[in-house]
Amino acid sequence: MKLWSQYFIPTLKESPADAEIASHKLLIRAGLVRKLGGGLYTYLPLGLRVMQKLTQICREEMERAGGIELQMPHLHPAENWQQGPRWAAAREIMFRADSAGDGKRGPREPELVLGPTHEEVITPLVKAEITSYRDLPKNFFQIATKFRNEIRPRFGLMRAREFVMMDAYSFDPTDEGAIRSYHAMKAAYEAFFRRIGVRAIAVEADTGVMGGSFSHEFMIPAEIGDDDVIYNEASGYAANREKATSALVPADLPDAAPVGAREEFATPGAVTIAALEAAPYGVAADQQFKTLVYVGDGKLFLVVLRGCDELEEAKLGALGFGVFRPATAEEIAPVMGAKPGSLGAIQGTIQDPAALAGIFADQAIRLIGNGVTGANRDGFHVRHVNVARDLAVTKFGDFRRVRPGEPDPRSGQPLQVRRGIEVGHIFKLGTKYSETFGAVYTDDQKQNHPMVMGCYGIGISRTLQAVIEQGHDADGIVWPWAVAPFQVLICVLDPQLPEAMEVARTLAVAAEQAGAEVLVDDRVERPGVKFKDADLIGIPLRLTVGGRGLKEGLVELKGRSQREVVKVPLAEAAARVTAAVHEAQANA
RNA sequence: CGGGGUGUAGCUUAGCCUGGUAGAGCGCCUGGUUUGGGACCAGGAGGUCGCAGGUUCGAAUCCUGUCGCCCCGACCA
């Protein structure tokens, strides 16, 4: 039992100006966290208690799924990362640590970074310690603070520079084993989110800088989420926008027959899709080719899409370039022979085709029968362009951004879109890290193989805020029983009456014996203040003990999400509280 | 990093355009009256107006720079 007057719950009537969304405001108003700097937060006692609930439940589910908990350092030798496969991509989000704090390393000071995640630490550890198939599979996890120099921290704990994450790493001897581990983690994640009382859906996701063969994100549907989930309720298809695809192009689509010979025509000043759509050209956007130029690992490459489609840049990750970015006009002109706006992928018109690493075409361009593209000559385009006959495509792929309403790849029904908060991510990594770090084992035939890895993360601190985003009303937070900082709040309206405090203590003992954690509001405040605070901090079960009720021999019982108050005779109060706690536990 | 905004007391803010004594509400302290949904009265403490330059007789206010923070985009748990 904790007495409010002796605890620390600094609630606020007004929300600070820098909080924009409901969960962020409530986080601060309910006294859960305070900001130190951008993306840096102190967990106040109430916030810490919720964090502890989340980590404990997460730990239990990970252990149930066979996970083994350990704890790795927050400071990593930069060397580990330099030897790893993603130093170039990861370094921009990593904080470097140096003792002087002036951005320079002192003499004989190792170069250290603050860990954004731990593949580069766990893989060398496993390499050193595990060499036999007899010791596999293994799944190690930790719950620890991560550091990422987010380009833009925002929304409180939602995207922070320092945050708490559960990260797990599985090592299997075979690919089938790795898939089993992956599914065990997927099930553990589902159990975790179920237990903490939030709806989270698993969606197919892009593997991003992580690499690896496949992955799912766990999303909590919320308007303020910064990811788009593309889904179809009936078929169960759900994917992150970056990964989402549609059945726009039939697999058996025949190549269109060429119509007429290619023909160059003058288009002075027309350098956009829209300009060619307009008079006097009148070429529909879906009959134009959009030719984009990127730089991948130092070499230019082309991406060709329909004029009406947008590039989904994340999908370029499938091309295997370590780092890529849009090319500048200065880089483009000498290779293509024209400035952006007049570019095309027609064989023979590219000035220096040898300088290109490839021409990658979205498969949807096959829907174009007789299209128009740039002539690689400023102020000119080409008509009667036919994909099979004219374009020098290295490889077709899926590079376009899916739009709602397009056919679901599973059922053909229209796809829908909604916003979500990513709270977890699981990856089947494959052997990318084990090969780089030499994490191999010997099988029963004395053969060595790289271990097949998976990695898994849950943003615990982000989940804390997502719980609030999903569970609040106009008055404040509505905690699910399993993660509430306390389960029972006893509001003592007249704490100066010894009798009232006496009743409160008796009920607190009853609730505690039933297995609840109890907060007693013994502050000398007006009832209105206490009720407002009670709603704000969102404790699931509220008991009210007041002088007025006591005269009638009554106390009151109210669920945070219920409107009505139940008056209970004093003599039955302890039993009723016990019953209410048991019932809530059973439903949690 | 690009675009937009903002910085005045612990919190929310007015004042800035048009330069001239820094104001309010909440919170806090003292006393009194109140007492079942954020009470009232009286008194009080608390601000080098983010920082540094500049213009001016005079700068919270105008100019320049800088830092912090917020929002939109790329990135992520």
Image (tube, rainbow, N blue to C red):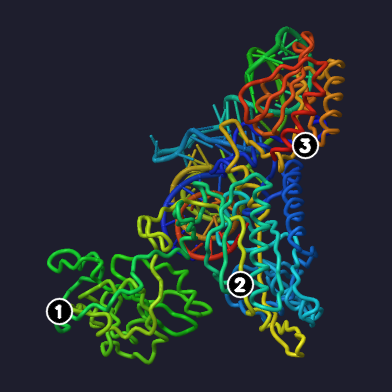
Residue topped by disc 3: A8
- Examine the image and state in which quarter residue A486 appears: top right
Secondary structure found at label 3: loop
Residue at 29% across / 65% down in the picture? A308
Q: Tell me the chain of label 1.
A: A
Q: Quadrant of the C terminus of chain A?
A: top right
Residue at 76% across / 58% down in the picture? A64
Residue topped by disc 2: A90
**Circle 2 Cα neighbour tier, 10 Å, few/some/many (<14 / 14–19 / ≥20):** some
Secondary structure found at label 1: strand
Number of the label disc, if any, that sits on residue A151: none
Residue at 42% across / 74% down in the picture? A326
Q: Is residue A103 above or below residue A404?
A: below
- Left or right of residue A274, residue B27 in this image: right
Give how far across and how far down residue A139 sits, in percent.
74, 68
Q: Is residue A185 above or below residue A588?
A: below
Give the CA separation, mark 3 to mark 1. 75 Å
